Image: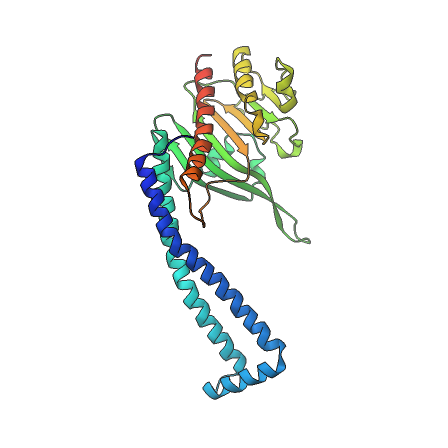
Amino acid sequence: MASLSAKTRKNLKDLNIRRVPYSTSCFAFYTGLASIVALFFFVFMNNNIQTTVFLFLEKILPTVSPTTTLLIIAGILCILLLIPYIKFSRTYRDFFNNQFLPALAEEFGDFKYKKHGINQQEFEKSNIFDTYQIDRYESMQGFFSQKEQAKIAWVKTAVQKGGYKSPRSYRTLFKGWFLQITLSKTLPSFFILPQKTLLSYIKKFTFTNVIKRPSSTPVKVAGPNFEKNFSFYGNPSSGVLDITASITEKYKHLKKPIFLSVVENKLYLAVQQQDRLPLPIRKVTEKQVRQWKEKLNFYITWYRKLCSALADE
């Protein structure tokens, strides 16, 4: 595994120090909340205890009903539990987003960290998904390189199901890591999509007049292994076709949906998966941070290979 810089190791130590009060307050809040609910249930389900408690509360506040008094006491207890939870949660989260992850981004050279990720307009320009259907868009944990003109971020999009007469719910359209890279030159648009992707799930090439409309029939790619996992759409040169297909095929071991597109001078890469870099509740080890680093480095190495190969074509 890749080693960590001294700055990242120091921030890891500080992160774990701040994690202790956060985890403690989190445990106290939810335990206290569960205890209050259990106490209410116990009081109101037992007539004898309820009578005793109500008589006691009437002596304390005779002008207020016992039920109201109980609710007031419960509210005060919840506030007392919530205040330290909010305080330590904010401190811990701010350190994670404003110091720890920026230090992790510096492990990759020119990269900087921004917690807001990639905006929806940039995501839509990839022309991969049915973006006109997106009802919810969320992007966070962005890693940006000004020198390489590269952006990496975790993105989650969803479409709304249901309508006027049925309950509304949301279906995930895409959730995973999304990359946008500026190429050194403009190329004809092309797309690589997972072989088993539902047609309704993918945007079927309804582009503006500025972008050339690709063929609706997948391009034949040399080698049987590629077409078992992917479909190639577009009209690139034979060199671009072979190079891109060859590099993409090497990552089929991910066993996750992979989407790739080139639109004008932009390369877009999307890998659908559940995980992002989580705000840890338990102690974070160097091994875990190295795994996070390797995950990000994996995508950086991938797009660098593609950019380098496409630049020579």
Image location of residue 163, percent across then percent down: 65, 50
Quarter containing the N terminus: top left
> Residue 198, located in which quarter of the rendered image?
top right
Which residue of the protein is positioned furthest toward the right in this rendering?
165
Depicted 225 relative to depicted 105: above or below: above
Percent x, y of residue 297 = 43, 29
Q: Quadrant of residue 129?
A: top right
Q: Is residue 78 left or right of residue 91?
A: right
Q: Please, is residue 143 above or below residue 169 in the view? A: above
Between 203 and 74, the one nearer to me in the picture: 74
x and y, in percent, of residue 168 in the image: 63, 51
The percent position of residue 138, horizontal first and vertical second, equals: 49, 43
Q: Can residue 79 be seen at all in this image of the molecule? A: yes
Residue positioned 62% across, 49% down in the render = 169
In the image, is 305 to the left or to the right of 130?
left
Is 31 in front, or is 54?
A: 31
Q: Considering depth in this image, is 51 or 210 the residue closer to the camera?
A: 51
Q: Please give the count of numbered marks on the rendered protein.
A: 0
Report whether 193 appears left or right of 81: right
**59 shown above or below 239:** below
Residue at horizontal 49 percent and vertical 33 percent from the top? 178
Chosen colour scheme: rainbow
Q: Nearer the viewer, residue 24 or 229?
A: 24
**What residue appears at the point 50 percent right and 63 percent down from the top-left corner?**
31
Residue 190 in view (yes/no):
no
